[in-house]
Image: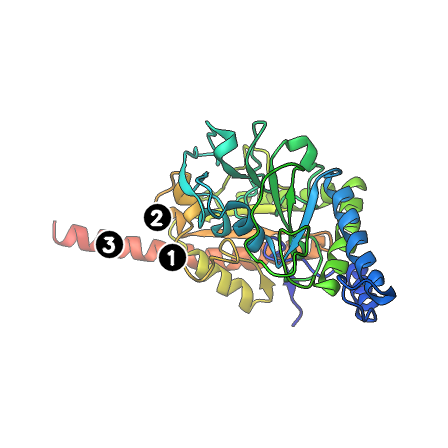
Amino acid sequence: MGRAYLDYNASAALRLEARQAMVQAMDCVGNPSSVHAEGRAAKAIVERAREQIAQALGAQGADIIFTSGATEAAGLALRGRAFHCADVEHEAVRAWCEPTLNVNRHGQISIAEPEKSAVQLANSETGVIQSLPEGVAVCDMTQAFGKLPVAFNWIGAQMGLISAHKIGGPKGVGALVVKRGTELAAQIKGGGQEMGRRSGTENLIGIAGFGAAAEAAIRDVEQGIWGHVEKLRNILENSIEQMSAATIFIGKSQPRLPNTSCMVTQGWKGETQVMQMDLAGLAVSAGSACSSGKVKESRVLRAMGFEPSSAGCALRVSLGPDTQQKDIDWLVEIWSKQYKKWNARVMIADQKQETLDGKYA
């Protein structure tokens, strides 16, 4: 039995360009901090990747500080600062902030003090895109980068978070993007790498892959690849809506990532659906990869005002450039079969309850 991967928001498949850049970097013996020829060759790989990411992200003139991922970048940006966020933020951001910002039913965040707020550009579970005011302190761009035509310099944020494996780069490398002139204290001290802001020998192989993936990802955006992905996402949603009047799509009335669909069928547990799809060969999720399997309900949906009976029934499908029509057809077929089985059980249970109610009335 084959499989279809429909969980791109958790991690994208490694791009060929990233793989090739990483293999080439493996032959570089030097340490980027060494001054001899071998060291300079390694340093050149790091700086080329830095420039590739700056160009792809629209962050010319900003500092790109390489980290082990967006989680470390969030800690570097937020630790020791009294910033505010909303409960829809990723755990990596929420861990350092006071979740005091309000979120409406559509997933939009109210931001009173941008300069004291950490706000995502797009939500990983619902795909909802925020309308950001000028001057946000920290912007989590992890899900939007490589899927939307956005630029760090347009947003006007002081700092931004990005991750390689969300755009087809390797896992275990990310970056903090810092508007030049922004004060930032190092959290990892030692040799003074990354402009003195993040010590430790750079992950040369990962960084090389990150740079190549960023260059390829922005090319996809410019060539309209994600417009095709959005059409597949819409086919999926329209097909399921025709089958189930009980299923709603979160944030559908709002601007969303072109690849993300978050559906809720009240009473049908999201984790149950994930397991059923997995057994059939389909990789989907019940929410963020950093929280799936750890919680009974979606914190994001609860923050948006949904009751636990709905927040525990979310199913996230996130498509990628490699997704094909046959993958969508397959998902719709399996989901439909499982939905009919679940719905039949619900009807039988309701009938039994009605009988009992009538008997003891």
Residue 295 seen in render: yes
Q: Is residue 143 above or below residue 172?
A: above
Q: Would you call the spot at circle 2 few (<14 residues within 10 Å), some (14-19), or many (20 or more)?
A: some
Q: Which mark is residue 353?
A: 3
Residue 108 seen in render: no
Q: Secondary structure at mark 2?
A: helix
Q: Secondary structure at mark 3?
A: helix
Image spot of residue 90 (x, y percent): 50, 49
Image spot of residue 43 (x, y percent): 80, 59
Per the model, the C-alpha gap separating discs 3 and 1 is 26 Å
Q: Which residue is mark 1?
A: 296
Q: Which residue is mark 2?
A: 308
Residue 173: quadrant of the picture: bottom right
Q: Are marks 2 and 1 in contact (CB under 8 Å)?
A: yes
Q: Depth check: 311 or 121 in front? A: 121
Q: Is residue 98 above or below residue 1?
A: above
Look at 80% across and 45% down and name the residue there. 219
Mark nearer the N terminus (3 vs 2): 2
Per the model, the C-alpha gap separating discs 2 and 1 is 9 Å
Q: Nearer the viewer, mark 3 or mark 1?
A: 1
